[in-house]
Amino acid sequence: MSFKKWSNYILLFTLLFFILVAIFNFIINPYSIFNHNILSKFFIYKNNIVSSRMLVFYNATKEDPNNIMIGSSRIGIFSKSEIEKYLPGKSFNMAMPGSNIEEQVQYLKYMIKNHHIKNIIWGLDFYSFNPDLQNDPDFSYNRLNSSLLFRNDLKVSLFSLQTTKNSIKTLLDNLNKPSNMKIITESDKENMKQQQNKAILKFTKDQISQKTDDLIKLYTKKYFASKKFKNPHSIDTNIYKIKEIITLCKNSNIHLYIYTSPVQEKFLNLYNNLGLNSTFAYWKVELSKITPYTDFCHYSSVTKNIMNFMDGSHIMPNYGKYIFAEIFNNKNVKQQKDFAKHIKQKRI
């Protein structure tokens, strides 16, 4: 057999191999980005993701919500059922751990433009305004500019070696699942989240203290490691981005609820220790110039009690009830009077 024929056979088998891999990954759909129901009753357990940013984007797009919760992992710990008590329609939590303001703003612009959004609950974090905090490596502007699947996401989800490995893992997970296991719905995910939150409430004081100290070291090296951040005016660009969304919401008849996420006393002390107090104070003032908001990020009887937090940065999930009661002015929920400060917009 001639070399040319061998070459053609090799090319043919290579092409066939990649086609079969793509079909396999498409059917298994380990990241749930393809909107199909092929064998969906069988592949119900999917726990292998490649990108948290990609996952939250496509899940939000498929859910097509009316109400969005957005911010960092600090809002991500709360169940969407907490806001569904106050807002009609379908809700979705678009929390992006470690995200900066730029990422959050870009996701909001996309959702406002492409979906019927009625309400946005935005949890703002001081660290997200750090001018030197880069976008997450998995964040992509091209993904947000794509009307369908982003080409790179499509390539990764069909042809990558890691995806094929995750498809095999997903297949094995489902082969070994209990026979009475049912399709995991959004309601099931919410129930699972609530069960996990109950387990978190059993953390001891020593465990929380250790987690807090570890997280402070991480934040010092990663989220606050910026000399520029010590200059209050360094956050002006990010303040302007918030203003852009405020204007966009007004023009689109969307209700925007903004609050600052509570952090434990040790984190509040950290701002002073790192020379960020001036920027922190400026942050609060500048926000008040562009919008009313609910401020939980201050010294209070809640933030001074370490047992109210999972790790210093994240308040216990059960406090979502109190945070949203304040935001939506529910007087029937009793809580510490100094927990929330309702900041009115200053007239300039």
Image (cartoon, rainbow, N blue to C red):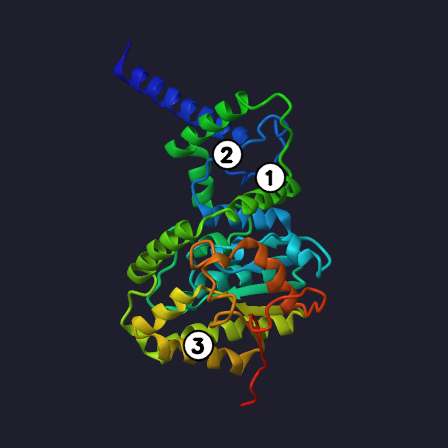
Residue 53 point in image, percent of width and height: 46, 50
Say which element carries label 1.
Answer: loop
Within 10 Å of disc 1 (Cα), the crowding (few <14, some 14-19, many 20+) is: few
Assess whether mark 1 and mark 3 are in contact (beta carbons under 8 angstroms): no
Residue 251 point in image, percent of width and height: 64, 73
Tell me what residue is drawn at x 45 percent, y 54 percent: 97
Which residue is nearer to you in this view: 141 or 96? 96
Cα distance, mark 3 to mark 2? Answer: 41 Å
Quadrant for residue 226, please give it: bottom left
User: Measured along the vertical axis of the image, is residue 154 above or below residue 303?
Assistant: above
In what quadrant of the picture does the N terminus appear? top left
Say which element carries label 2.
Answer: loop
Q: Amino acid at mark 3?
A: Trp
Quadrant for residue 118, please give it: bottom right
Mark earlier in primary sequence (3, 2): 2
What is the total number of numbered labels drawn onto the structure image? 3
Looking at the rendered image, the disc whose residue lies closer to the viewer, 1 or 2, is 2
Residue 235 point in image, percent of width and height: 39, 75
313 to the left or right of 328: left
Assess whether mark 2 and mark 3 are in contact (beta carbons under 8 angstroms): no
Q: Please give the residue where the numbered disc 2 appears in the rendered image.
A: 30
58 to the left or right of 37: left
User: Measured along the vertical axis of the image, is residue 61 above or below residue 273?
Assistant: above
| Numbered badge on residue 35 | 1
Which residue is nearer to you in this view: 87 or 4? 87
Q: Please give the residue where the numbered disc 3 appears in the rendered image.
A: 283
Which residue is nearer to you in this view: 286 or 236? 286
User: Measured along the vertical axis of the image, is residue 14 above or below residue 81?
Assistant: above
